[in-house]
Image (cartoon, helix red, strand yellow):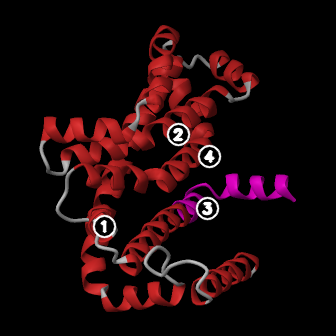
């Protein structure tokens, strides 16, 4: 109830500011106007939402697979970790708005550059969180595995990978929350559909309610993905959720 009450208070204040004329409606649409646009433009918004959601889901899946694989390789091979660690960190210094047009010029206006940009945004939290989770395994448990004759890869498969799953899920959840940013920048660089393209068209046309409706759907998409991954983690790793709940209590 607390988040709902805070959201209602903010929406009420937003509505009052616009209705009292403190801000021009062409610059800031009232929440009721945004809601009206969501209903009246539902067909257009639903189609663009489907396109953006597909880009986000596929890009997030690509980043998850690559991030988990690279984290495992960097954990097992120390030279590889020293060689690739700075590159992984440096990948987040690449300005997405700058590289997006270059990828579009290189790969065209299809799905490819959009997936790469979403994956670039999502790659870092998945890799770093998983790498930290693999490194945080109890050393005594590693000694036990060695005493039982387990090799490096067997220890990774039976001990370290399961223990790192909560951290990996955290990384994927964080990536899901920011994945829509990569999709929007990719669509701004070159697209004929999607919520990012809709924003690019609606804003200069002063279709402010429609633009804010697109932003609301982008926020809803990010929150829904985060919530879905949280529920999946609770189903797959109930023990980790209970342990986290006890530590917070």
- The mark lying in front, picked from 4 and 1, is 1
Residue drawn at (42%, 53%) of the image: 181
Residue 238 x/y as whole percent: 65, 59
Residue 189 x/y as whole percent: 25, 48
Using the image as rendered, state which of residue 86 and residue 168 is in the foreground. Answer: 86
Which segment is the magenta one?
229-249
Which residue position is annotated with label 3?
234
Q: CA distance from mark 4 to mark 1?
A: 44 Å
Q: CA distance from mark 2 to mark 1?
A: 34 Å
* Dominant SS type (magenta): helix
Which residue position is annotated with label 2?
125
**Residue 204 bears which disc, if any?**
1
Q: CA distance from mark 3 to mark 2?
A: 20 Å
Residue 72 x/y as whole percent: 48, 27
Point out the tag, 2 or 1, that comes first from the N-terminus: 2
Q: CA distance from mark 4 to mark 2?
A: 13 Å
């Amino acid at each position: 109830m607390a988040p709902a009450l805070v959201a209602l208070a903010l929406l009420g204040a937003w509505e009052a500011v616009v209705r009292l004329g403190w801000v021009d409606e062409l610059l800031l649409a009232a929440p009721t106007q945004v809601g009206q646009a969501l209903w009246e433009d539902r067909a257009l918004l639903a189609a663009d939402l489907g396109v953006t959601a597909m880009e986000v889901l596929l890009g997030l899946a690509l980043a998850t697979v690559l991030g988990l694989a690279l984290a495992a390789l960097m954990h097992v091979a120390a030279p590889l970790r020293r060689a690739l660690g700075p590159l992984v960190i440096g990948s987040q210094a690449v300005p997405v708005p700058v590289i997006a047009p270059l990828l579009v010029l290189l790969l065209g206006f299809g799905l490819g550059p959009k997936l790469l940009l979403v994956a670039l945004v999502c790659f870092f939290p998945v890799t770093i969180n998983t790498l930290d989770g693999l490194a945080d395994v109890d050393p005594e448990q590693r000694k036990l595995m060695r005493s039982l004759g387990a090799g490096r890869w067997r220890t990774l498969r039976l001990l370290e990978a399961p223990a790192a799953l909560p951290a990996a899920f955290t990384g994927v959840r964080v990536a899901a929350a920011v994945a829509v940013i990569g999709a929007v920048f990719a669509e701004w660089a070159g697209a004929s559909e999607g919520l990012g393209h809709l924003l690019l068209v609606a804003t200069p046309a002063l279709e402010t309610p429609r633009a804010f409706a697109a932003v609301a759907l982008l926020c809803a998409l990010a929150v829904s993905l985060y919530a879905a991954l949280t529920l999946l983690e609770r189903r797959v790793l109930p023990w980790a959720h209970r342990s986290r709940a006890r530590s917070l209590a």
